[in-house]
Image: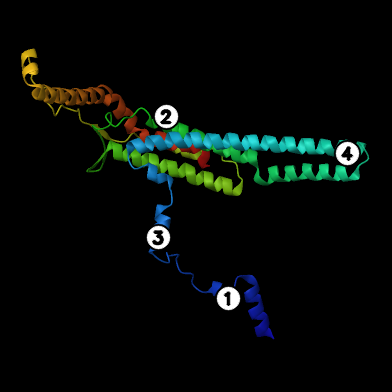
Amino acid sequence: MRKLLSIGACAALVGCSAALPIPVAEFENDVAFNKAAARFHALARFRDFKGAQEALHAYAVLYQDEANNKRLLAQKLGETSFYSALGGVIAGIAKSPEGALIGGVGSGAAGILSDRYKLTVQAANYDLAAEAMRCMDRETNPFSEAGISGLSFISGTQSVSADLEIRDIAAKNFLIVQDRLQKLQANFVLGTPDFSKLRELAKTQPERVDRTAKTMTLSAPDALSPTTRTRDPALAAATDAKQKAYDDEKKLVDEENAKGSQLKVKAEDYRSRMAACTAPISG
């Protein structure tokens, strides 16, 4: 009898197999693996520096739209609750128990739905996430592919190109915001600022960033006389193509060298400023 009770209790809880070691999840086959690998993930947008810039901006828009949608839904539910209650009162005045019952149920259902999903809390969390994305977007926006091509982050004896390092910093902080938002929404908890994080960031020393002035790799082609251009159109076309390539490179070189010193300063505390952007939703 005792044995039967033991077996029954085991089955009633979680099953006797739960007492055994649970293996780590693994894909059943290549089809399952490929299906998971093909599933969209936001990090796919962080393929390069430009992709990181686009992703930060796009998710700021997405999260703000979601915040607005949830606030609008909460408002609509509130109106539904009000008008349902009003309908119940009117039906009661008309001495219609059936109408009063329907009105009361409608009012209660709308209130329960609004409270269950805590739409205003969710909207506030999306606001926080959107602001974090906008903040990171603002911090990243001053950089350009041409402007940072002469910058590199130095760690010990290693040197990492700024476009890769800035992309990785952006991706890391993007995931912090996304992960925190998911946890807040799963528990219907309002995000709060992490002041200890802000205090620590205030003490952070600038990173070491080197800047190498960009130089031209192309030479301007020799100018052709009008007579030569008329006599040899192919040579004229080739010369014009070389001139365009030279002009394009010179524009990039001038842009980098003009902004290089300012971007170097921004890059030195880019990591701490990006981290500060996530603090309002990290706590």
- Per the rendering, the mark at residue 91 is 4
Which mark is nearer the camera, 1 or 3? 3
Alpha carbon separation for disc pair 1 and 4: 57 Å
Badge 1 vs badge 2, beta-carbon distance below 8 Å: no
Please state if 39 lies on the left or on the right of 84 as rendered.
left
* Residue, far right: 95
The kind of residue tagged 1 is Cys
Give 240 or 103, whichever is nearer the viewer.
Answer: 240
Q: Give the residue at mark 1.
A: 16
**Contact flag, marks 3 and 4 (Cβ < 8 Å):** no
Q: Quadrant of residue 269?
A: top left
Q: Is residue 182 visible?
A: yes
Could you tell me which secondary element the residue under label 2 belongs to?
Answer: helix
Contact check, label 3 and label 2, Cβ < 8 Å:
no
Where residue 177 appears, x then y in whole percent? Answer: 48, 42
Q: What kind of element bears circle 1?
A: helix
Of mark 1 and mark 3, the one earlier in the sequence is 1
- Identify the residue under disc 3: 33
